[in-house]
Image (cartoon, grey):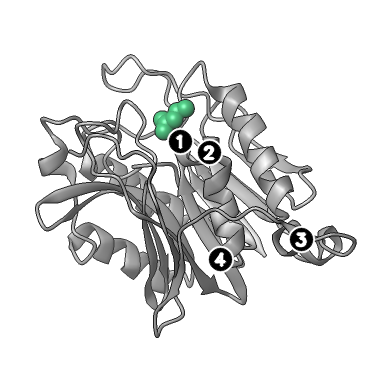
Amino acid sequence: MRIELAQLPCEDGNLQANLKTALAAIARTRSDSDLIVFPETFLSGFPTPENVASLAQPLDGHAVSLLLGAAREHKLSIAIGLAEACDGRFFNTTVLLTPSGLAMSYRKVHMWASDQGVFAPGERIECCEWRGLQVGTLICYDIEFPESARAQAILGTELLLVTDGNMDPFGPVHRRAIVARAMENQMFAVLVNRCDRNSSGTGLQFPGESVVVDPFGEIVAECGAGPEQRVVELDLTVLTRARAQYDYRKERRIGLGGAVHQDKNGRRWFSVEPENTPPSA
Ligand code: BAL
């Protein structure tokens, strides 16, 4: 399994420029790569309450259709973050696009400060079958809550894709969190972070440091601080080896609450039983 980490700068508020950057990255992928992963809200950058309506995209809109065309052209799957518009509300969403279409869309459940007043929180953890693997997605702040990745494990996720927009000084927090989430759930984790150092006046600095962690919690590959498009080979046999002597998912004794659901297309999700719901946008 070959995955490309698109640790590339995006411009807050500039949808066209970010879409162009994404399509160019897709165009330069290796012909034998299976998936490219971009950071959180890569298409929009971090929206504000003032500009989210102009930046947010419907999942059946032009921007996503261009990416679907690129997925078909390059026989490649794409995980990318965007601001989603749906029924007058806005969500911080990651989509998994394949040459066959939209495989999954996940709405960030845990709202960071920059999400509040902009996005409504998601209400379910999702996974789907992709290339013979159970694949799930989380977004940035989600990985700081162990129950998010544990919900993915309960769904059967073997490959966790994290679109990240983790700013300084929280680089170490996500490095520790992603290793823990991979190890304690015995799954691969692919985290791709923003790396822009001065994003259009927000004052936020993004350290990059994208990383791939195996089900033992070992680092498979890691990026530095600057822009790069890193090709990483996953040895999927590690999944079986990591679970050979013990399997946390099967042997756990404490439940999360919430329920597992599945639709006729095999999409599975875990309904969130929020103990507290942040102020919605
Ligand atoms: N530690 C940052 C979390 C977020 O931006 O979602």
**Ligand 1 picture quarter:** top left
Q: 229 left or right of 118? A: right
Asked if disc 2 and disc 3 are in contact, CB closer than 8 Å, the reply is: no
Q: Position of residue 77 (x, y in %)?
A: 47, 66
Q: CA distance from mark 2 to mark 4?
A: 16 Å
SS at badge 4:
helix
Reading the image, the residue beneath label 3 is 251
Out of 28 and 122, give the one closest to the viewer. 122
Out of 154 and 205, give the one closest to the viewer. 154
Q: CA distance from mark 4 to mark 1?
A: 20 Å
Reading the image, the residue beneath label 2 is 145
Q: Earlier in the sequence, mark 2 or mark 3?
A: 2
Q: Mark 1 is on which residue type?
A: Tyr
Q: CA distance from mark 4 to mark 3?
A: 15 Å
Q: 78 left or right of 117? A: right
Closer to us: mark 4 or mark 1?
4
Q: 178 left or right of 241? A: left
Residue at disc 1, CB closer than 8 Å to ligand 1: yes
Closer to us: mark 1 or mark 2?
2
Out of 159 and 72, give the one closest to the viewer. 159
Q: Is residue 248 above or below residue 49?
A: below
Closer to us: mark 4 or mark 3?
3
Q: Mark 2 is on which residue type?
A: Phe
Q: CA distance from mark 2 to mark 3?
A: 20 Å
- Please give the label number shown on residue 155: 4
Reading the image, the residue beneath label 1 is 141
Asked if disc 1 and disc 2 are in contact, CB closer than 8 Å, the reply is: yes
Q: Which residue occupies 40% across, 85% down?
A: 264
Q: Mark 3 is on which residue type?
A: Glu
Q: Earlier in the sequence, mark 4 or mark 3?
A: 4
Q: Earlier in the sequence, mark 4 or mark 1?
A: 1
